[in-house]
Amino acid sequence: MSQNLPVALTCGEPAGIGPELAAKAWRELGRELPFFLIGDPTHLPDDCPVIVISDPTQTAAACERGLPVLALPFPRPATPGTPAPENAALVIKAIRTGVELVQAGKASALCTNPIHKKALVDGAGFAHPGHTEFLAELAGVKNVVMMLASDALRVVPTTIHIPLAQVASALTPALIGDTIRITHQALQRDFGIAHPRLAVAGLNPHAGEGGVMGREEITIISPVLDELRAQGIAVTGPLSADTMFHAAAREKYDAAICMYHDQALIPIKTLAFDSGVNVTLGLPFVRTSPDHGTALDIAALGAANPASLIAALRMARDMADARAHK
């Protein structure tokens, strides 16, 4: 993928902070990083200069004068804080359009503004838990992995949005092995790390402490790690999660593989609350997203922090460049 191609940014939920973030990101990035928004130009803040484009090739020139927008007219105006059911199908269409453009070689990467899942379910019968699963379906990929990344830390939760009581039964050798392999390949392909170092957390306190506090480390996790080491993957663990995330520990690995959602997200949100990036690994194209939701409660108040979206756009560009140089 040519590094001269722009990044495609989807509008996300127009009643949330997405429009404000897109405008602020353009002001910050300007000529540094050409990107275009897929959505309705009328949803953007009044003080944001908008340049409607008909093709992504017009992005670089348009960025000099305003935020380039590939116009997708929505049936309803954006009412801050209140999603319109009539707009749900167009939010979904913006995502589809972004995927099509990246797959057609017209954009280098896809960056997605946050969606409001309930609004999509209520307004368009959206049948997916979230962006990640929908993008996997559009790409025809079965197994994808969610990574949260920042300058300080990269983490991957092996299980994501399931109750804590279901985690142990969900942790199969196949799931753990696939998660680690996909992460290893992505670090090589998308982050330019020739020999990735992976640290794997245990499930139980103190990584089970030899079976006293749980045996999943012995019966499930360790055999998978032994197999991966035999395949040449540099993986350590299972480790006690409470000693994995201090500064000296983080220097010893390129990504941490965690067993459940909060085990991964608490440390990265502590270290990089405003600048973490959600990355989908295992897709045939690059996809990033800011690591926050639609924030309906502060929509259009001017208070939204664009740091995570700006980081997501920069990471999308850098990942696309890494793929282009493979």
Image (cartoon, rainbow, N blue to C red):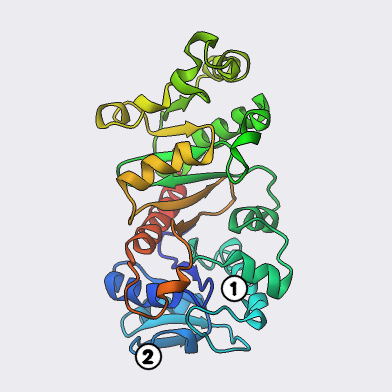
Q: Which amino acid does label 2 sit on?
A: Asp
Residue 281 quadrant: top right
Disc 2 element: loop
Disc 1 element: helix
Name the foreground residue: 204 vs 289: 204
Look at the picture and state if 256 lies above or below 38.
Answer: above
Count residues near mark 1 (Cα–Cα under 10 Å), then give few for <14, some for 14-19, many for 20+: many
Residue 244 x %, y %: 36, 27
Look at the picture and state if 105 lies above or below 237.
Answer: below
Residue occupied by mark 1: 94
Q: Can residue 236 be seen in this view?
A: no
Residue 130 quadrant: bottom right
- Answer whether labels 1 and 2 touch (C-beta < 8 Å): no
Name the foreground residue: 209 vs 314: 209
Viewer-nearest of discs 1 and 2: 2
On the rendered structure, is 23 left or right of 113?
left
Q: What residue type is labelled 1?
A: Ala
Residue 146 x %, y %: 53, 45
Name the foreground residue: 57 vs 197: 197
Residue occupied by mark 2: 46
Look at the picture and state if 195 lies above or below 120.
Answer: above
On the rendered structure, is 161 left or right of 48?
right
Q: Is residue 69 visible?
A: yes
On the rendered structure, is 59 left or right of 137?
left
Residue 190 x %, y %: 45, 45
Tell me which label, 1 or 2, sits earlier in the chain: 2
Look at the picture and state if 275 lies above or below 46.
Answer: above
Count residues near mark 2 (Cα–Cα under 10 Å), then give few for <14, some for 14-19, many for 20+: few
Q: Residue at x 42, y 30 (%)?
A: 196
Residue 157 x %, y %: 52, 38
